[in-house]
Amino acid sequence: MNKEEIVEIIAAKHGISKAKTRKILRTFLGTVQDTVVRGERVTLTGFGSFVAQLTEPRIWFNPKTSEKVHIEAKRRPKFFASGAFLTAVDSANTAADEEQVYSGTPDERLDEFMEN
């Protein structure tokens, strides 16, 4: 689902124009982004929390060139789903979802993937 599909659902459910819904959604997303950029947490009860987390600096090895590359520490946005959200997603499992769960070793899964 993309942003425009969300706009269509909200507009239809609440009887407001898509243009007004787009503005509201844009304001909401901008507010979440601005708050996280300032280093503050955004918590939506029953949904989850958005935060900025600092990644540790590290050394990465480029296998093609055998070169070691220093990667600086960075702040990255992170989302933590609430318990209610996690439970809702988990309880929505269907037989089709269960068929998609892979078993076997990573090599066996790779072989299966390459065959399809």
Image (cartoon, grey):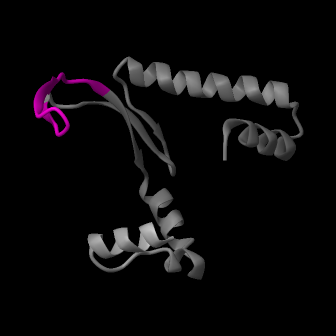
Kindly identify the residue that appears in the image at 52 percent across and 64 percent down.
89
Q: Position of residue 61 (x, y in %)?
A: 13, 36
54 or 35, which lies in front? Answer: 54
> Does residue 66 belong to the magenta stretch?
yes
Quarter-of-image position of residue 69? top left
Quarter-of-image position of residue 58? top left
Kindly identify the residue that appears in the image at 37 percent across and 25 percent down.
40
Vertical relation: 85 (above or below) 33: below
Looking at the rendered structure, the number of numbered marks drawn on it comes to: 0
Quarter-of-image position of residue 37? top left
> Does residue 91 belong to the magenta stretch?
no
Side of 97 where 9 appears, left or right: right
Side of 103 where 60 appears, left or right: left
Q: Position of residue 16 (x, y in %)?
A: 87, 34
Magenta stretch bounds: 59-75
Q: Position of residue 15 (x, y in %)?
A: 89, 39
Kindly identify the residue that appears in the image at 29 percent across and 25 percent down.
75
